Image (cartoon, rainbow, N blue to C red):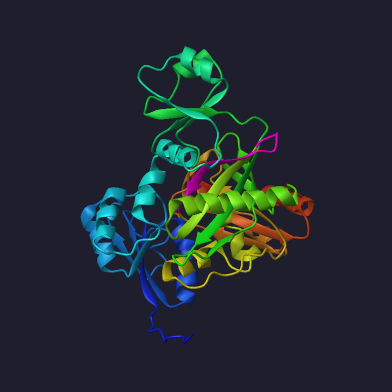
Amino acid sequence: MTNMPKELPLARLGVVGGGQLARMLAPVCNNLDVQMTILDPLYNSPAGKVAFDQIEGELNDPAALQLLCERSDIVTFDLENVGAEILVALADQGIEIVPAPAVIRLIQNKFDQKCHYRDSGISTAEFTDVTAESSFSDVEAFGLPCVQKTHTGGYDGRGVHIIRSREDWENRLETPSFIEKFIANGTELAVMVAHRASGEMVAYDPVEMVVDPELNLLDYLVAPARVNANVLKLAQELAKKTVESFATPGLFGVELFLTDSGDLLVNEVAPRAHNSGHHTIEACMTSQFENQLRVCLDLPLGKTDLRGYALTANLVGEAGYDGLPVIEGLDEFAKIANSHIHLYGKDECRPGRKMGHFTLVGDDHDELIRRLASIRDVLIVRGDTPQ
């Protein structure tokens, strides 16, 4: 087999969305001499600050999406809340978009996503649609407690409502939605999977996600997950089966529930880089972002082996402040060995907003969790103005 020479720059990569995920993709693009252009409505977006170029425009604006495609050889995503129908039409015209916009459209609707898993023979929590005729008696018959999820628009804990009582039902989300079984005492796992057009596929070690109960978003994760080796293997196999069902190249974050009876259930999938893969930058042989780029360029995928135990924690805006971002405790954090911080370049800090993350690499889970507790005492991101 002859390796054909490749012209440089290697490619022009368009990214729909200019948030922190695209920002963390930028260094990988620079390493491979790939020119990354961002589409985002925010001037000087987090990724726009470090990208080759940025187009200012809404993510569902046909003209802006068309312009991004014209300036790109391949287009991918920072988030899935984009103009999928427009991108489907552009893909039909021969624009290379990874993953396929039809899959983005499917994943945008969580009910359709759940139906896809059921129809594909992929284990997922029992669910049923909520209609205008649905009553509390119907919900009781389905089983309490249960989780109401909006069909579309849910993100980072939004669009989710726990129903335990008639009062919770009366305060339900008044938008198209469905309910699914509440997984009591379950463990939340996630597996990043990269899938090339050639069929090559790699899965990262499953991580265990600990969710902040108030913000309903990731507090921290540990890698590998604190489960037995058989569960780790089965989680990777289920994640690969799920990604295969989409029949498109791409990078996917597959969120799973491990029930107290030992069953693995697919919760939902992100068709992009994901919070559950941020540890891979320092803790794995190849980061999720490098493999995302390799998928887009159809290059052989990198090894996903862990270099050790890892913990990644979100840095969110401190309660009681907003305004321009301020960080406290950075000097103390910088003294800690095998600790790595990523700040997302956001110009406004609000309580609970993701402003960055840090990753710790070490020899065992307990050591990492102890280090996390000491860091949380000193490292704070907040706005400069008390509320």
Q: Residue at x 35, y 61 (%)?
A: 97
Asked if the magenta segment contains residue 299, the reply would be no
Which of 270 and 78 lies nearest the eye of the viewer? 270
Residue 361 in percent (x, y) is at 70, 61
Q: Residue at x 22, y 54 (%)?
A: 62
* Residue 163 in view of the camera: yes
* 345 displayed left or right of 256: left
Q: In this view, does 46 lie above or below 317?
A: below
Which stretch appears magenta?
259-271
Residue 173 in percent (x, y) is at 42, 25
Quadrant of the image occupied by residue 184 = top right
* Residue 353 in view of the camera: no
Which of 321 and 175 lies nearest the eye of the viewer? 175
Q: Residue at x 31, y 50 (%)?
A: 84
Asked if the magenta segment contains residue 267, the reply would be yes
Residue 12 in percent (x, y) is at 35, 72
Which of 180 and 76 lies nearest the eye of the viewer? 180
* 326 displayed left or right of 263: left
* 178 displayed left or right of 253: left
Q: In this view, does 95 lie above or below 128?
A: below
